[in-house]
Amino acid sequence: MAIITLSRELGSLGTKIADTLSSRLGYSKLDKESLEVLLKNLGMPETQFERDDEKKPGFWEQFTLEKVRYLDFMKAAMYRFAGEKDCVIIGRGAHILFRGVAGTLRLRIIAPPKVRVERLRERLGIDEQHALRMIRQSDYDRAGYHKYFFNAVWDSAADYDLVVNTAGISPAETCDTVLALLRSPTYAGVGDLARDVLLDLRIAQDVIIAIVYRERVPVMSLDVVCDKGVVALDGTARSADVFDRCVGIAGTVEGVARVVSNLEVVEYSFYAGF
């Protein structure tokens, strides 16, 4: 099991590199279009995906639960996708979501602003100022997206395993380097370990989707952790009935072997002031 997450600046040739890696390695590719299909299958409205995808949220949007729903569904989709096949995942904060998962190569593709502007001018037939505005808006949106959803700095080199500047390194050379890294002991031979971790991550997100979004159980601050199929629930419920519903629903999710509940029952009066 191998995963490549690829973060890219507009005009850096990152998408071309992702396509080449996917083709040369025979890996499945998860991009905006394919992720949208997965999210739709999970039950998330298409309009929300278009509104939130790699964009900095507006001021008032920061206070809506829809943002939390977007992240929960995206995690569920990505973990399921990565757990089923070797893959290249483009953008969407995947380098944060898969941090610590064995066999994950977190790649970032960059280029100097002048190079990016010239590439956009040639590809789109636009003038320099238009290209520069597009780059600035893209960088602003992607930086805001990562800050809001992950409290992360989008261009922090410390969050990536490999940063490539395509002003001097070609897409072909970049792919050759990535292939060599994937053959190294750090990435080769860790398939089973990665698969087990991804299965637990997927199960935990499926439990959240089932309880909070499919069945709409009124549980607050739900946190779910899965370890080898054993699911632990944390959060607060305002009645024992809600407590029991959460446990029962979690037990029906595919892959769950046992449910351990640490949910606390809090009297209704506690919620009345909110």
Image (tube, grey):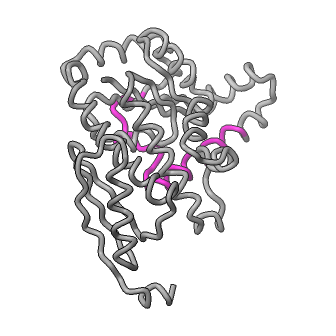
Q: Residue at x 50, y 47 (%)?
A: 73
Determine which quarter of the picture holds residue 126: top right
Left or right for 146, reference 225? right
Q: Toward the viewer: 187 or 129?
A: 187
Q: Position of residue 138 (x, y in %)?
A: 64, 41
Q: Which residues are magenta?
A: 134-163
Q: Position of residue 187 (x, y in %)?
A: 25, 23
Q: Residue at x 69, y 24 (%)?
A: 118
SS assignment for the magenta stretch, majority:
helix
- Magenta stretch holds residue 19: no
The total number of labels drawn is: 0
Q: Toward the viewer: 119 or 47?
A: 47
- Magenta stretch holds residue 153: yes
Say whether residue 118 is visible.
yes
Left or right for 49, reference 250? right
Say whether residue 148 is visible.
no
Left or right for 180, reference 109? left
Q: Residue at x 58, y 69 (%)?
A: 63
Q: Position of residue 263 (x, y in %)?
A: 30, 70
Quadrant the N terminus occupies: top left
Q: Position of residue 224 (x, y in %)?
A: 33, 56
Q: Toward the viewer: 12 or 184?
A: 184
Q: Residue at x 23, y 59 (%)?
A: 260
Q: Toward the viewer: 238 or 40?
A: 238
Left or right for 222, reference 124? left
Q: Is residue 206 above or below residue 151?
A: above
Q: Is residue 256 above or below residue 221?
A: above
Determine which quarter of the picture holds residue 157: top left
Q: Is residue 101 above or below residue 72?
A: above
